[in-house]
Amino acid sequence: MAIKEITCKTALHYHNKKISTNWDLNIYRGCAHRCVYCFAQYSHKYLDTDQFFDDIFVKTNVADALNADFSKRSWKGDTVKVCGVTDAYQPLEKKYVLMPKIIRTFIRYKNPMTIATKSTLLLRDIDLLEELNEVAGVSVCASVSVIDEFIREKIEPFSSPTVDRLNMLGELNKRGICVGALMMPIIPYLTDGVENLDAIFKLAKENGARFIHPQLLHLRGNTKKVFYGYMSKLFPELLEKIKPLYVGSYADENYREAFEREIKNLRRKHNFYNEIYKNEDENKKIQLKLL
Ligand code: SF4
């Protein structure tokens, strides 16, 4: 893996597609979690490499850039999503320790944050997250797709075990932090079994998740080529079943409808409907309408 240290002029990135917020903050480009279905690979297309998993760019000055962004008069204090593209708690974060500086900057400006990760490394910063939650509000999403460790190690090799990620939510919940699960992406014929989906719903609920957001695999751009390449080695028979579902970038409509029915059943079974979380103090409001 090649690590490239870079500096950035601004830390915050505005995007038109509002998913809980319009503002993203990504401290790394590329991600060494190496998930076979990674849909963030497009973000390397403006760089001089297409090795999303192997060429990782580290924004070493990102906390200073964020401080400058937050201090602008034009900044309105919107919720910022950390890890909108790449995972801030990927393996390199152990070495660079950028997130504590980032969270302290959010605390200084009393700015709300929402964050999603596939790593329990986030627990290193639990005290800071609790402090941020008290002054501004924070929500944490565990991104998960499969309970079975044999499959997880194949498709998300450098992430944390799924059960640990969901139990991490319980630790955060005990500190009063709003938590939820992003159940994505679900891979047809590999992780779409009702036992797997049911186990994730159950564990998320037990750990205090206030919302769960299931999403099927989509294969836009380069992701299809990379995903098919991995699957041809890992699960070749399954790949032959998956391919006819993905004539385009999204799963076949009939399959999608069947999946949505299953999710509805599970919501009913676990009495698990998403909440829109608001901090009691309206000035510290975080909206988390994800589904
Ligand atoms: S954690 Fe997210 S960004 Fe990183 S490889 Fe996996 S899907 Fe891609």
Image: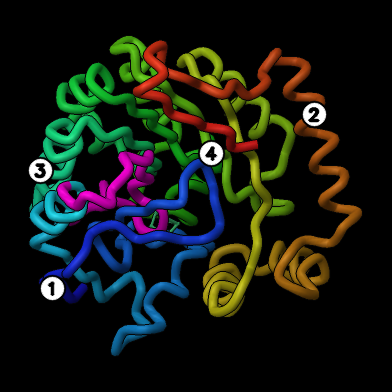
For the residues labelled 1 and 3, the Cα–Cα distance comes to: 17 Å
Q: Nearer the viewer, residue 260 or 287?
A: 287
For the residues labelled 4 and 1, the Cα–Cα distance comes to: 30 Å
For the residue with label 1, is its CB less than 8 Å from the closest atom of ligand 1?
no
Residue at 69 percent across and 67 percent down: it is 239
Residue type, numbered disc 4 = Leu
Q: Residue furthest front?
A: 73
Which image quadrant is residue 118 in?
top left
Say the numbered circle drawn on residue 6: 1
Q: Position of residue 115 (x, y in %)?
A: 36, 40
Which comes before the other along the chain, label 2 or label 4? Answer: 4
- Which residue is denoted by mark 3 in the rendering? 101
For the residues labelled 4 and 3, the Cα–Cα distance comes to: 25 Å
Mark 4, secondary structure of its residue: strand
Mark 1 burial class by Cα count in 10 Å: few <14, some 14-19, many 20+: few
Task: Using residue 234 as the reference point, say whether residue 77 is left or right of it.
Answer: left
Q: Quadrant of the N terminus?
A: bottom left
Residue type, numbered disc 3 = Lys
Residue type, numbered disc 1 = Ile
Task: Using residue 110 as the reference point, say whether residue 145 is left or right of it.
Answer: right
Which comes before the other along the chain, label 2 or label 3? Answer: 3
Q: Is residue 81 above or below residue 211?
A: below
Q: Are marks 2 and 4 in contact (CB under 8 Å)?
A: no
